[in-house]
Image (tube, helix red, strand yellow):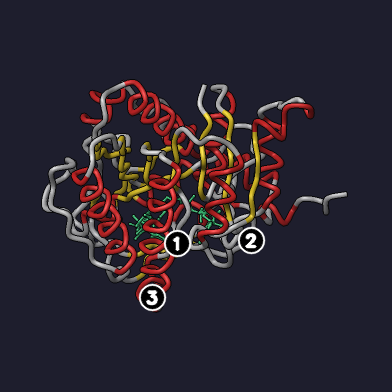
Amino acid sequence: MATLLITGGAGFIGSHTCLVLLEAGHNLVVLDNFSNSSPEALRRVASLAELPPATQQQRLRVIQGDIRQPADLQQAFTAASIDAVIHFAGLKAVGESVQHPLRYWDVNVAGSRQLLAAMQVAGCRTLVFSSSATLYGYPDQVPIPETAPVQPINPYGHSKAAVERLLADLAASEPGWRIASLRYFNPVGAHPSGRIGEDPNGIPNNLFPFITQVAVGRRQQLQVFGSDWPTSDGTGVRDYIHVMDLAEGHAAALTTLLGEPPQLLTLNLGSGQGHSVLEVVRALESASGRRVPYALVERRPGDAATTVADPTQASARLGWRTRRGLPEICRDGWAWQQANPEGYASAPPAG
Ligand code: NAD
Ligand code: WQD
């Protein structure tokens, strides 16, 4: 059992990971500024973990604060003696990063630097970092191994590459750092209870939340970006990973880091399976019993035809692999969307 600082723990991936970590017996301090999430997510995590009220304050402490603010970081590191940090906090919208690169270098890069400085002061040298398959840009080979070139094609990807570089420099500078950079492929789905899930602000940029919002009647139709890709049905192929598999991957990475000598691990977290846009549409239709109308439109700039992980290294180093496929992703993602058509805003006001 460890005490963990979870930055961005109220977000989509963070909230699911918090639940898995609480169920594994860890104590958590969450630092989140709620710029892209709701405190309601963490209330539901506490309820799903069935934390007795008397232990709740010790098991799941929530600090509203910003990773760029040294005082907020100090508050987090003095709330408890932190054994390890899982660092989710950041901005993640590719299009926004092209429009506002300074925001991405500020939150993702300068924020991470600030966090690492606070870890040094606190004497905490164990970190799991949210990296991304976006680092591979237009991949030269598929499935993509971790040895593939890092060649991001947008400011969001550049910011993740910069943090990976910084982590490698830090690990080389002094012994004792235990770091895992986890390169996620396409995280989707929700906890099977349907009580926590992905709650994007405004019009979703990503395929899966867009499709579930069409199925629930919030949006009229899906635009399929490109039907002339060199894939089986002409639509883009991605490696969709159930967010619960991803959450379990973080728990496995933590166990490996804490149980082995100091090291820097860089691992793909994906299923190794690719699915086309139209396959996802059909799977969601089948899980929901609803139709998902769509129109075939032009390709979206910056998209690759196919990105699929080679997950061999994660399996070898973490003893982890995905256990849930597209049917479970659609079943659980639909359960969340149907029970919360407006996301966390569907919840009755607290009190
Ligand atoms: P999310 O937006 O749901 O979660 C990020 C959380 O960080 C939010 O709760 C937000 O309020 C918080 N946050 C943002 N800026 C902050 C700041 N300055 N200080 C404190 N908290 C802050 O995103 P997510 O999908 O859960 O992604 C988590 C991490 O995984 C991100 O770093 C993202 O780049 C990375 N990632 C996500 C995906 C994906 O497709 N979802 C893929 C690869 C990597
Ligand atoms: C998947 C497929 C689209 C929307 C993005 C980021 C990446 C990572 C994960 C953080 C593609 C098609 C999509 C729509 C569509 N995030 N599509 N209609 O682009 O693989 O990855 O999220 O690190 O950095 O770039 O995911 O869900 O946007 O697209 O046809 O309305 O669905 O063209 O083939 P992507 P996505």
The CA span between labels 3 and 2 is: 32 Å
Above or below, comparing residue 314 to residue 40 in the picture: above
Mark 3: which amino acid? Answer: Leu
Along the polypeptide, which appears first: circle 1 or circle 2? 1
Q: Quick check: which quadrant has ligand 2?
A: bottom left
Q: Amino acid at mark 2?
A: Arg
Most foreground residue, 77 or 231 = 77
Q: Is residue 291 left or right of residue 139?
A: right
The residue labelled by disc 1 is 91
Taking the view exactly as shown, the residue that stands out farthest to the right is 351
Residue 331 visible in rendering: no
Ligand 1 closer than 8 Å to label 1 CB: yes
Q: Which mark is residue 102?
A: 3
Residue 208 location in percent, x, y?
A: 47, 51
Q: Distance from label 1 to label 2 (Cα)?
A: 25 Å
Between tags 1 and 2, which lies in front?
A: 1
Left or right: where 324 falls relative to 273: right
- Residue for point 38% across, 71% down: 97
Disc nearer the start of the sequence (3/2): 3
